Amino acid sequence: MTDDVLAQLRELQQADLPTHGGRLLAYVYDSGLAEADEIGRQALALYGATNGLDPTAFPSLRTLENDLVAWAARLLQGSEAVGTVTSGGTESILLAVQTARDASAAVSQPTMVLPSTAHAAFHKAAHYFGVRAVVVDVDPTIYRADPEAMAAACDESTVLVVASAPSYAHGVVDPIPEVAELASARGIRCHVDACIGGWILPYLRADGIEVAPFDFAVPGVTSISVDLHKYAYTPKGASILLHRTPGLRRPQYFAHADWPGYTMLNSTMQSTKSGAPLAAAWAVVQHIGDDGYQRLARTTYDATLRLADAAGAIDGLTVVAPPATTLIAVRTDERADVFTIADEFVSQGWFAQPQLSFRGQPASLHLSLSPATAPRLDELIEALQQAVTAAQAAGPVQVAPELAEAVRTVDPELLDDATFDGLLQLAGLDLSGVIPDGLGAVNALLDLAPPRLREALLIAFLDRLMRPT
Ligand SMILES: *Cc1c(COP(=O)(O)O)cnc(C)c1O
């Protein structure tokens, strides 16, 4: 019976993209170290039944968390820093925003100033916690935050200023000293989103590569998020939020004694939480170690630079910004569209993430490299070249005029089930067979819609996907 259900799981998993092998250039981060994976899996199994709700009941979890936070604080030069292990980058960011809001309880309508390249998780925090996001355009040529414009956007209601190290979409590190300085001059907290770069940049620096200042060595940086389940290559469900001092962290904690049950005391958004991702993260970090991370960071960074050179040399492709870490984004000229390139790439067994056009910037394709990608870099470059050639031969996706018209005119507020079905029918789409190599037409269509309508369409789409059959 046991074998039977596990066999069923394996069977179901056949439909998924491959998590290992370095061909998935988003979502997963593969160290390429089979032993590290095995240790992570065993730690998950050992700790799957523990509960992180109460670190006095499971004192080992407290040790593991303090060890990981100490590791991150050392990497990010926070000599007095404290922190919390969370379930992911989004939870770390939600908590950073909530903490900043509650530290300024006197501000009745709090706001936060974000560069337009900040991760969508800040907008989720705005939505959940009632902190209005004031979005400031980045420099349109280099995609870096514009500190002067951000300073001008601050006022008495600003409780947080944000910068990225680097941004997810383009892999660009913001001018963090200038952003932190403008924040501290006004007594405002400054969060550095190093979710994707925080475990790479310190190791690149240790290896002698010049890295722009981004961590607690920069005066005025008050908190940093860094994900373990990205470039620390740990199983999913682990990130760290650091605060420069214990005092800055205090409003993050929640206690409630005014109910008949146990005294509720939480450091994160979750209450009962599995100790498994924490234990697995601890085990993988100990196993790979500083030397291992430094070597993996160098290998992946070198591969990214080589990919950037090769991609820039492909006729029709442009690299959006020089890579600061292990991420690159590319765009194409009018002979093709990135959505078709993405589909062609998938059909060759690779996966890169399409990014829709935004604030006058054209659509692009995002690639996050993993150590496991490095040995097959030539294969990757060849696949990209072929995908571009095929996409140019096919030409850009032509959205039928009546469909384009519908997408430009539908009111997102009025997108009910019937309207959504009408659009699906018009587009000839059948959601039962949604596969990643057939999304070009869907993306091209979404690309025509304004952001509010894209959101409404995606929500309607998810609502349809997630119904029990
Ligand atoms: C991945 C990422 C996040 C969000 O993290 P999740 O783990 O997906 O919740 C936030 N910011 C940046 C820069 C990221 O790369």
Image (cartoon, helix red, strand yellow):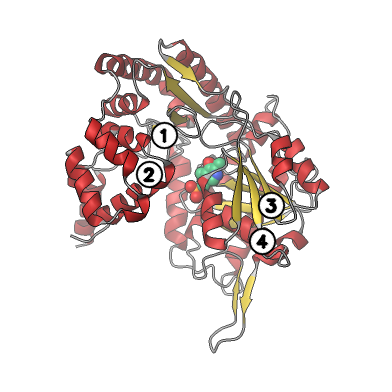
Mark nearest the camera among 4 and 2 is 2
**Viewer-nearest residue: 394 or 237:** 394
Q: Which residue is mark 1?
A: 356
Three-letter amino acid code of the residue under disc 2? Arg
For the point 43% across and 53% down, which residue is it? 42
**Viewer-nearest residue: 306 or 107:** 107
Residue that extends furthest to the bottom in the rendered view of this protein? 260
Q: Are marks 3 and 2 in contact (CB under 8 Å)?
A: no
Establish if 143 lies above or below 70. above
Q: Secondary structure at mark 4?
A: helix
Residue 82: image tag: none
| Number of residues whose C-alpha sits closer than 10 Å to that of mark 1, classed few (under 14), some (14–19) or many (20 or more) | many
For the point 67% across and 27% down, which residue is it? 207
For the point 67% across and 53% down, which residue is it? 242
Q: Which residue is mark 3?
A: 160
- Is residue 3 left or right of 156 when viewed as pictured? left
Earlier-in-chain disc, 3 versus 4? 4
Q: Secondary structure at mark 2?
A: helix
Check the picture and name the quadrant holding the N terminus. Answer: bottom left
Q: Which residue is mark 2?
A: 454
Q: CA distance from mark 4 to mark 2?
A: 29 Å
Residue 420 picture location, percent across and down: 25, 50
